[in-house]
Amino acid sequence: EIVLTQSPGTLSLSPGDRATLSCRASQSVSGNYLAWYQERPGQAPRLLIYGASSRSTGIPDRFSGSGSGTDFTLTISRLEPEDFAVYYCQQYGTSLLTFGGGTKVDIK
Amino acid sequence: EVQLVESGGGLVQPGGSLRLSCAASGFALGSYYIHWVRQVPGKGLAWLSRINSDGSVVFYTDSVKGRLTISRDNARNMCFLQMSSLRAEDTGLYYCARGGRATVTDFLDSWGHGTRVTVSS
């Protein structure tokens, strides 16, 4: 099973700031099959990024994904009020999918 | 519009059983992999199980193997999660989610709103 470690656990920022979230895998993620999800309170998770860097339909271009192998990054270029949420990475390169522990982006 | 609606959650005693259902609309369920994911407040998301398009291949995370059984009825556009020998640590919000048409596209692009399971005496 691939273990995904997200850092930091909490990121305290202000609207307009740039957010950089990290996801590190215990072994190389096959095909860079790495996705990012956003979870807002009381809402279902929403797919943001798949294939490490492809934005899902309707996702604003302030969200971008990068990385390969074992190190991946989600960047939010300028935080909007609705972006304060919890973000999860997930790998789907093996038969047993796994999620990271999440990064909470909260208002400073 | 793609929709997934879970049902069947509730309060159950340790050792008990529940059957969760996931009803799909707006797309042909039979063309996609379906997943179940558990959300525990303070502990994040945990992937539980996956079933392929025709139900012939299933996978489970180790902690639920032997206790959870995933199945599907494509004619009814539904997926199920049979849960048995439930433990307190199975408490959480259970989501079904649509995966891909193949393993290489098996990210979760649509989610239901979840059904809550509480295991307590």
Image (cartoon, coloured by chain):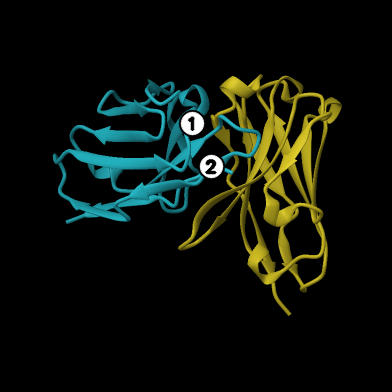
Determine whether label 1 and label 2 are within 8 Å by CB: yes
Residue at mark 2: A2
Chain identifier, yellow in the render: B
Q: Position of residue A13 (x, y in %)?
A: 17, 50
**Among the 4 quarters of the image, the one containing residue B121:** bottom right
Camera-side residue: B79 or B63?
Answer: B63
Q: Is residue B10 left or right of residue A61?
A: right
Q: Looking at the rendering, in which quadrant would you find the N terminus of chain A? A: top right
Q: Amino acid at mark 2?
A: Ile
Seen in the picture, residue A51 relative to B67 is either above or below; the reply is above
Q: Position of residue B90 (x, y in %)?
A: 67, 63
Residue at 49% from the left image edge and 31% from the top image edge: A29
Residue at mark 1: A29
Residue at 73% from the left image edge and 39% from the top image edge: B59
Dot 2 crowding, Cα within 10 Å, few <14, some 14–19, many 20+ = some
Q: Position of residue B32 (x, y in %)?
A: 69, 24
Residue at 59% from the left image edge and 39% from the top image edge: A97
Q: Looking at the rendering, in which quadrant would you find the C terminus of chain A? A: bottom left
Q: Amino acid at mark 1?
A: Val
Residue B8: give its label.
none
**Among the 4 quarters of the image, the one containing residue A20:** top left
- Secondary structure of the residue carrying tag 1 is loop
Seen in the picture, residue A88 relative to A32 is either above or below; the reply is below
Q: How many badges with numbers are in the image? A: 2
In the displayed image of the protein, which residue is found farthest to the bottom? Answer: B121
Q: Is residue B83 left or right of residue B6?
A: right
Earlier-in-chain disc, 1 versus 2: 2
Q: Kindly identify which chain the residue marked by label 2 belongs to.
A: A
Real-space Cα distance between discs 1 and 2? 8 Å
- Secondary structure of the residue carrying tag 2 is loop
Q: Colour of chain A?
A: cyan
